Image (tube, rainbow, N blue to C red):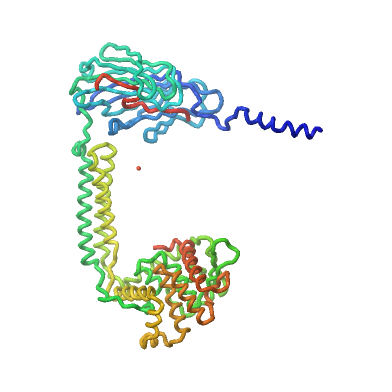
């Protein structure tokens, strides 16, 4: 009976728990009070007659006695009418003038230390801004938001005092407006005119996201407006000079590429080739074809079809995973031996293996060194022209310098809101021209021997893409039969195996793997260098080789070579917001 009663009471207990007030796991750092916000403004002129505003804000906050807040966050505003005001925070102290810890990140001022703060805390922030007076069709006014509309806290008393220096007090028109409330509100706030051009404004009991704003009119011509023209600062001109220099360097790079950096002429016509070029390693071919990302997978396939290693697809894995097994290193060339050592270490022991399941950084670094060695040997063996480093280096240096000049000048001009869209244009043109010049001169031209090999490889790609009947017709021709030593199916398979690494280089390994698989099927045999996880199937062989190529690239990736006198709340400059930390 007691069990039944407990069961009947269970829904009520669940309902009671559901309606209980939730206790937050983490205290809200914005849950505190701001009883007063006092701002003092001093407006003066610089040597060019443009406005300078010095601000002192005194913010009194009352934090809870629990360990919730470490300080205050003040969101200032550095943009006014589309230009920067060059915001400069000068100091942050407490009421006694003792410095407080703070960090500035753009417009965000975080005033906090490592310790929690409790009770009443006073934050005094001093900062300076420029070009804060609105000049529009002859109307001149200082139109400003005091605390801003981005506060989550209510404010009991918000005050602002404005002083005018450098003769500006004599240029006041007497048109003064003050409002309070949410964004767009026109509810009046208190105005207290003072002597010698001093004004005081006050708003009380402001709810969160409400502000005090004021506008004070000045005579026409009393303040010079912000000058955002192209010639207002030297930086747009600096950026333009950099862009022009970059374009000149680009023109020079084009001329150099068409003359001294030009590849030797190759064959007038590309002829289909069904055998690889003699004496050319896979890494060398990959470099000449600009297929460095495929070089590792192609070299592994080449070593496999020549019997030096085996590729084993592991069983029981959701995604295809592979293991490389070392067999022997007989009859390998210099690059192949270096490659085997990179994969299997200094000691090559038949039967040892390496999995491709996880990236091998050490092997990747060794393969990267091999790539550098191959690059150097291209010149040593006469495939690429040597002795052009001085020309390439000079053009590259000037291109980099020009791009930097265009970028720095443009970025500074944009930061100062000078020159309109011109700094954007010169910055983009300068950088693009510099990059294009670098790309053009980062080319070491091919010699006649190198051009011949490149054309041979292009002919090999053409053969790989022929229809099956056309391929067989070429192999069965008199010349073709002589070159492959026989006309039977076994010889065709041997040729197809030799071409599989190049199919990897050209990115058609899956299709060519299926071609090779059908050739094996015709002989009722299967490759001894590739062991799949399922019975032999020509289509699955192609899919497996394609998947292996992707795995090899991932595993050894290291080897791949942003009207005067009127106001509404929140409509002026300054303002911003803040909260707790």
Q: Position of residue 497 (x, y in %)?
A: 46, 77
* 29 left or right of 88 in image: right
Observer able to see residue 445: yes
Q: Position of residue 252 (x, y in %)?
A: 20, 59
* 10 left or right of 233 in image: right
Query: 471 or 58: nearer the eye?
Result: 471
Which quarter of the picture shows residue 203? top left
Count every numbered label the image shows and give the total: 0
* 4 left or right of 159 in image: right
The quadrant of the image that shows the N terminus is top right
Residue sitting at x 51%, y 82%: 523
Q: Position of residue 434 (x, y in %)?
A: 26, 54
Query: 213 or 467: nearer the eye?
Result: 467
Q: Is residue 480 above or below residue 301?
A: below
Residue sitting at x 29%, y 23%: 143
Q: Is residue 432 above or below residue 553?
A: above
Which quarter of the picture shows residue 161? top left
Which quarter of the picture shows residue 180? top left
Q: Position of residue 365 (x, y in %)?
A: 45, 62
Q: Is residue 383 above or below residue 78?
A: below
Residue sitting at x 43%, y 80%: 495
* 501 left or right of 219 in image: right
Observer able to see residue 60: no
The residue lying furthest to the right in this view is 1
């Amino acid at each position: 009976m007691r069990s039944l009663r407990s069961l009947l009471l269970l829904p009520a207990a669940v309902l009671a728990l559901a309606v209980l007030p939730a206790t937050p796991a983490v205290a809200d750092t914005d849950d505190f009070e701001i009883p007063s916000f006092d701002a003092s403004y001093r407006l003066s002129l610089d040597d060019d007659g443009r406005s300078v505003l010095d601000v002192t804000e005194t913010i009194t906050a009352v934090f809870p006695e629990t360990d919730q807040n470490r300080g205050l966050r003040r969101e200032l505003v550095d943009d006014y009418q589309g230009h920067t005001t060059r915001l400069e925070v000068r100091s942050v102290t407490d009421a006694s003038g003792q410095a407080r810890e703070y960090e500035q990140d753009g417009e965000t001022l975080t005033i906090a230390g490592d310790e929690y703060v409790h009770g009443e805390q006073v934050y005094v922030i001093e900062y300076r801004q420029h070009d804060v007076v609105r000049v529009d069709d002859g109307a001149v006014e200082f139109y400003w938001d005091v605390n801003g509309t981005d506060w989550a806290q209510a404010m009991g008393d918000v005050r602002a005092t404005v002083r005018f220096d450098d003769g500006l007090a004599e240029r006041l028109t007497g048109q003064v407006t003050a409002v309070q409330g949410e964004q767009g509100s026109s509810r009046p706030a208190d105005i207290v005119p003072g002597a010698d051009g001093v004004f005081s404004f006050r708003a009380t009991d402001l709810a969160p996201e409400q502000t005090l704003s004021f506008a004070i009119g000045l005579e026409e011509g009393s303040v010079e407006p912000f000058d955002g023209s192209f010639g207002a600062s030297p930086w747009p001109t600096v950026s333009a000079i950099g862009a022009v220099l970059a374009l000149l360097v680009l023109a020079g790079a084009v001329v150099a590429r068409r003359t001294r950096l030009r590849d030797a002429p190759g064959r007038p016509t590309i002829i289909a080739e069904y055998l690889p070029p003699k004496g050319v390693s896979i890494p060398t071919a990959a470099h000449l074809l600009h297929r460095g990302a495929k070089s590792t997978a192609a070299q592994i396939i080449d070593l496999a079809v020549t019997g030096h290693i085996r590729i084993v697809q592991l069983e029981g894995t959701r995604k295809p995973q592979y293991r490389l097994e070392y067999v022997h290193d007989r009859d390998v060339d210099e690059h192949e031996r270096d490659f085997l050592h990179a994969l299997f270490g200094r000691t090559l022991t038949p039967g040892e293996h390496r999995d491709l399941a996880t990236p091998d950084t050490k092997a990747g670094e060794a393969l990267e060194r091999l790539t550098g060695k191959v690059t150097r040997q291209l010149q040593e063996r006469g495939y690429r022209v040597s002795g052009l480093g001085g020309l390439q280096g000079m053009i590259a240096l000037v291109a980099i310098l020009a791009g930097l000049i265009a970028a720095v000048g443009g970025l500074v001009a944009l930061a100062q809101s000078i020159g309109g869209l011109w700094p954007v244009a010169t910055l983009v043109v300068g950088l693009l021209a510099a990059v294009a010049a670098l790309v053009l001169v980062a080319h070491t031209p091919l010699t006649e021997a190198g051009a011949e090999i490149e054309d041979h490889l292009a002919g090999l790609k053409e053969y790989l893409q022929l229809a099956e009947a056309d391929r067989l017709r070429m192999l069965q021709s008199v010349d073709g039969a002589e070159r492959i030593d026989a006309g039977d199916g076994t010889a065709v398979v041997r040729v197809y195996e030799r071409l599989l690494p190049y199919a990897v280089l050209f990115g058609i390994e899956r299709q060519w793997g299926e071609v090779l698989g059908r050739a094996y099927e015709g002989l009722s045999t299967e490759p001894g260098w590739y062991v799949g996880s399922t019975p032999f199937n020509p289509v699955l062989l192609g899919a497996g080789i394609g998947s292996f190529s992707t795995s090899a690239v991932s595993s050894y990736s290291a080897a791949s070579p942003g009207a005067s006198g009127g106001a509404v709340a929140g409509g002026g400059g300054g303002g911003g917001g803040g909260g707790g930390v």
